[in-house]
Amino acid sequence: MKEHFSKIGFVLAMAGSAVGLGNAWKFPTMVGQNGGSAFILLYLLLTILVAFMVFLAELSIGRLSRKDSVNAFYLLANNNKKAWSFAGFFMIGAILIVCFYSVVIGWIVYYIYKSFFTLPQNINESAALFSNLLQADIFSQIICFSIVFIFIFLIVNKGIKNGIEKMNVFMMPALFILLLLMLIYSFSFDGFLKACEFLFYPDFSKLNENSILNALGLSFFSMSIGVCAVLTYAASLPDKINVIKSTLSIILINVLIGIMMGLIIFTFVFEFGADSSSSGPGLIFVSLTNLFSKLGILGNILAFAFFVSLFFAGVTSAVSMIEPFCFYLINRFNIKRSLALFYIGIFVYIIGILCILSSAVKTNYNFNIFSYDLFSLLDFLTSNILMPLSAIIICIFVAFCINQEKLKNFFIPYMGHTFFLIWINFLRFICPIAIAIIAISNFI
Ligand code: PFF
């Protein structure tokens, strides 16, 4: 008998998957580079008009079939069942993401450890600490990655209810409380007002066509769409949960935490004068760490709280990347969860270590593929190719290839006839075309 989430367990687990490292560095960085709240408005618009619609489609495949992703496509397809079942293999995208994602959570573990000691005193020291970790301190990276690896696999090994749900029910509120405390603390800085102005005062002149691409890509990555994570969690949806309200709550939690992280990060950036347009890892591991050091021991506490909250956010996402393939292997080969995880673990561990080695440019092990290090290659492949492609396939599958009566019976009690019509037409015409244009223009 398949385990089911409780109602709150599902919302928190799905929000846990959505809220992740993407909120911590992709969201604030892109907001910073694309005109503050003008970009947030665009992101919200695309999240509601496209990501929300595709999310519901992916969710419906999982909930109506209650199967792993390959079997779900097989079971629901009206025709060409075998061919459709291959669409379920997009779950491999999630496994590829978890390989490099766990390496980054490993860096976070390293910084949690560092928060107990004197933090780097100036921006040069801070940059040196980070580049030393990446380029020379392979040993620490491997240790931290291994800790993360063991932790997430142990959680997934405990299953949906005892592992994934329990962890999310603890970590998501803890993450929220930690962020709230840090946010309240940032009120006391002048930088807070500047951060608000930066994030909430729309500067439409900074938007360009790239902003649209970025906003859509971000909303997909952030909502965990297109790699069967949503589908697999939805296969364990409890009966009678209002899927529309739950999905809107997940979006709200995701956006709220992104904004909270943005406010905290930019308060410190403006207060202590770092570059607000510096991006990604640089913003968090270099700028912030250095800024915390200016607050003495309080800075250490803040650094600890900040990196622990990032750890929670990352780990709750990482488990949702492993579960789809694990669930598939259990069903397909009728094996125990632990054995399925053993096979997945070997792959993730090897690729994770290769990611570490490939970005360690100062070592002899360094190697590149098509001028990308393995790390960036996996990121590019999953976010820019697999996720959009799979999202288009999901739209077409749900809109044209499954029993529409079943779909109506499931959704109409929650969304009514009118919204159902709007939704299905979005899936038929607007979403696939919009996603295709965006994905293709990434390459031009
Ligand atoms: N939503 C996660 C984040 O924003 O960091 C990333 C993610 C989680 C992508 C789960 C894919 C996935 F299956």
Image: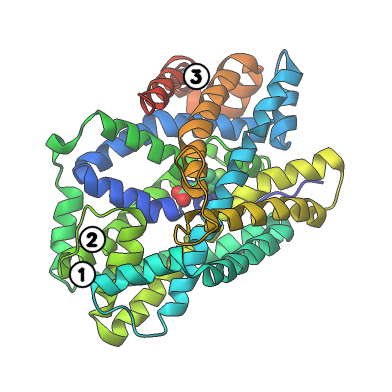
Q: Is residue 54 left or right of residue 121?
A: right
Q: Is residue 104 above or below residue 199?
A: below
Residue appearing at x 53%, y 67% in the figure: 138
Badge 1 density bin: few <14, some 14–19, many ≥20, Cα 10 Å: some
The CA span between labels 1 and 2 is 12 Å
Please report contact status of discs 3 and 2: CB closer than 8 Å, yes or no. Answer: no
For badge 1, the amino acid type reads: Phe
Q: Which residue is mark 3?
A: 424
Distance Cα–Cα, label 3 vs label 2 = 39 Å
Q: Residue most toward the front?
A: 364
Could you say whether the residue bearing mark 1 is in a helix, strand or loop? loop
Label 3: element kind: helix
Q: Residues within 10 Å of mark 2 (few under 14, many from 20)?
A: many
The picture quadrant where one finds residue 163 is bottom right
Measuring from the top left, give residue 268's x and y in whole percent.
Answer: 22, 67
SS of the residue under disc 2: helix
